[in-house]
Image: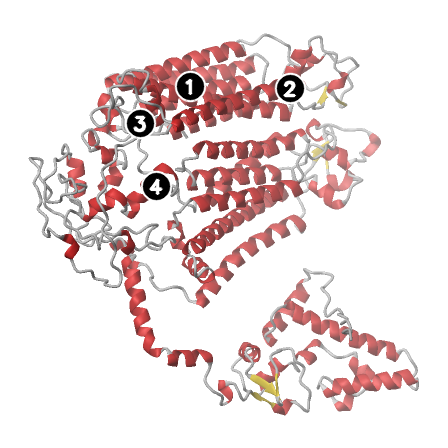
Amino acid sequence: MSRVPRIYSKTYSTPRRPFEKERLDAELKLIGMYGLKNKREVWRVKYTLAKIRKAARELLTLEEKDPRRLFEGNALLRRLVRIGVLQEDKMKLDYVLGLKIEDFLERRLQTQVLKLGLAKSIHHARVLIRQRHIRVRRQMVNVPSFMVRLDSQKHIDFSLKSPLGGGRPGRVKRKNAREGTKELLVLEKSFIRVILKIRSADEMSLDLTAPSSGRIAFSACLHGLVLFGLCTAMSLMHVLVPPFSRLFFCDDQSIRYPVGRCSVPYYICAPVGVLTAWLTIAVAEWRCRDRRHLRSAPALVAFARRLFATSEFAASYFAAVLYAVYYFCVGLAGCDFLMGMAKNAFGRHRPFFYTVCRPELPGGFCNASVAYDAAVVCRPAVSAREFQDAQRSFPSGHASFSLYCATIVLLYLQRRAGRCRSALLRRTFQFLAAVAGLYVAYSRVSDYKHHWSDVLAGGLLGDGMAWLAASVVPREGCGLGVEGKQDEARETGSGDEGKEDAGPGASPEISSSSEAETDTFGTSGLHVRKFHSNSQPRPGVNTTNSNPNSPAPAPKPNPVLQQSSSLPSPDSTAKPNLNPVPKSDPVPIPNPNPNPARIPNPNPAKVPKPIPARKPKPDPVASPGPRQNLRAHPGRMEPRASAILAGVGHLLVLLMLGAACLIVHFAVKPFQRGFYCDDESIGYPLKEGTVPFSTCIGVGVVLGLFVVVTVECLRHWHAPERVKSDRPAHPTLLSVVGRILPEKFAPLFAAITAGLYQLAFACLANEIFTVVGKMGFGRQRPHFLAACQLNTTCVRGKLYTPDFCRPPDSGKFTNAMKSFPSGHSSFSMAVCVYLAVYMQARLAFRHPLHSLKNLAQVALVLVGSSVAMSRVSDYKHHWSDILAGSLIGTVCGALLAAKFFSPLAPARALADAPAAVVYSESPSRAADGGNRGGGGGRSGGHDFVA
């Protein structure tokens, strides 16, 4: 027999006016007075009361002796009296219309439990009911909204199975009584495990106890409330607050453009941007193993550990992703809130405002000296919401959102995947994200949705909020790749360096990797180093020797390193070595225990195997000289396949960027922007340029080649000790050219090639940004009317399209619509700023002619500025085009030069340092025991091969 389908009916209805103050205050008062969970419980009672009143009103319309009124009216009254809502002396339909919502709330089980004294408060009553401690007669009820009848009111009591009603103790008390003897052992083991995770005395002040469930819930509610508050404020700002009603002039040409189509709608831009950012966060956190930034979120860490109790990596990954996504959402909500507040405060008209407004001017003609009020003269044919949106131009929401997401992707990849081996792929994604964000911003101008200043302000707002949101994530390296593995081994103390820290007399049991405790969340560090019996390294002793009793030759002494080696290591529990080995002959240190395998193991349950000594491997990135010779064999060195592939990859990147620039420049037509024939800003005469673009490119190439070659020659010939002490910025390129050129010229050629490659990349990246902007904006040059040759009579105030032009030269006419940004300015500033920063980075040593470097830098910036300013005097660009082009070129040149060729550390402290320290740690990192994170080992600049 088939089951009868259940019919679900409506239980409540939402208010028609959701933001009515009096109703909101009344509902909040009822919720607090009767301990309700949310407003739905109030709406359910209101809906029930409304149906009862409706039935009573229908019955009152009938006659008093009508059979339906007598039958249904008496049944309704008896039901209300039975549940205690209506008194027996008021059994009339007229009194039903006077019922209130409080009458029904008083008959709830939760309220009755409090009145009978079974609970301490109204909320305590709800907890008792939900936890099945209350019964009505013999029935256990766990629904707080249960309506209690009058005859059942005196039978409300505690359940017989409840501990409050004389039943057996609760589950927690029984479990504690059963496992009371095991608690001390568990606490002791937990305390020992936490103590082993402490790697420095500074972390002793941390709260080592795991957050309780209440603290986790409170933290989740607090962070959720912050995010919900920002989202609510953002929504209210867009929906309820109207924009400022700004006056306008009827002859203002900046607001008389037609209503254009939207190239990138917001319903496409928003999900693509958010999903791209979230996917970037997930991938970057999957590759990165550093979780030290989660120290500030202990509740999140505890929640992740409870959720993924079987996998420590899954818990740390989930916590890191949720941490980053939360701050991304908070930054996005804050950015949108500030953007909405600025839109409503400024009330700037969009470029198509006059078309949407359709004003009815007094007298039917435009008076240029009168400012009109949009609320008075406008007769819009669109909805009120669309008309208000036409007054929200500044700043651009699309620009702020797209550049916020693009900057988050760029910064997050740089911070969390900055030291991964796949640098070429990372930079490609960063470049694509920047291009996508700028394309969305450019499209808002070409679609007549915003002015250029709106897009600029929105982009700056999005970039600023993205920098703030990304600042909570530390700049750490990946645990993958060659460099990441070396850094991870150095931090965890594994490999040869771990043995070196253990000392010649340490036992294999204590220094084995099986006894090492790690904490992937970073509450005590990313990877805790191993605890050794003698973890203080001794200078002058080769601890990697298989025979610890035999003396080893000491490296050349260095006072900075000797001073740092006498300091206590943060990972060592032994006392600091206050008597460093003097600079004289090395002192052989005998092994206090010739047979370290017989040292008793503190943990007999775990007997690890002894770790065999490894032979030291040659440094693959060492510069030529006494440390490593490029010609290790009589024959020529064979180049590595990875070096060849990386070189080919970099060459392909340059070719792809160059091909993209050519395709966009020649195959894509600029945006056909309308114009006014009486616009004075585009009515200048056509004249030849002072600096042609071919001359600009030729001078830039020659100048870049001359400066890079000169700087590297000075650096290699006048500061050879600086070159030897620096980690080479081009190790794999050095291995390739080492088989072709002599040893003396191989590093010089590799450095010059790396510098020219970065200059070419900066110029091509700058060019792709400039060309995309030219095609997207389609702004007319100051000599546009001279190149257009209008074929009709000029009518003042009429918007013309380029179809009315009859140009004698189609090439010059097309070029006349590529004004913003300036290509000459961007290229010249990119080359000059790159070379100026390059000189500052590579010539960071004292020289008698040091002032000539400053003079050359000033001259480079002056040359670039002169080329940019000449474009205004030649009537080729507006001043805003020059400003935008100069900013693009400056950013591209400065970022690439400053990042890949950062200033080097002082050579005097590293001139005589051992190779293992120079190539792994900077002086500050070596001085404090290598406890700093975030790429301290990359002291020489950019690796040429990704």
Q: Which callout, 3 or 1, points to the residue nearer the camera?
A: 3
Residue 930 in view here? no
Marks 3 & 1, CB-CB < 8 Å contact: no
- Marks 1 and 4, how far apart at CA: 41 Å
Residue labelled with disc 3: 728
Looking at this view, is 351 or 81 the one in front?
A: 81
Going by the numbered disc 3, the residue's amino acid type is Pro
Looking at this view, is 566 or 348 the one in front?
A: 566
Sequence-first disc among 2 and 3: 2
Q: Which mark is residue 1?
A: none
Q: Quadrant of the C terminus?
A: top left
- Marks 2 and 3, how far apart at CA: 42 Å
Q: Which mark is residue 861?
A: 1
Residue labelled with disc 4: 485
Alpha-carbon neighbours of circle 4 within 10 Å: few (<14), some, or many (≥20)? some
- Indicate the position of residue 652 as horizontal and vertical percent values: 49, 23
Q: Which callout, 1 or 4, points to the residue nearer the camera?
A: 4
Looking at this view, is 346 or 553 the one in front?
A: 553
Alpha-carbon neighbours of circle 2 within 10 Å: few (<14), some, or many (≥20)? few
Residue 239 in view here? yes
Going by the numbered disc 2, the residue's amino acid type is Ala
Name the element at disc 1. helix
Residue 332, placed above or below residue 80: above
Going by the numbered disc 1, the residue's amino acid type is Val
Sequence-first disc among 4 and 2: 4
Looking at this view, is 880 or 714 the one in front?
A: 714
Marks 4 & 3, CB-CB < 8 Å contact: no
Going by the numbered disc 4, the residue's amino acid type is Lys
- Marks 4 and 3, how far apart at CA: 19 Å
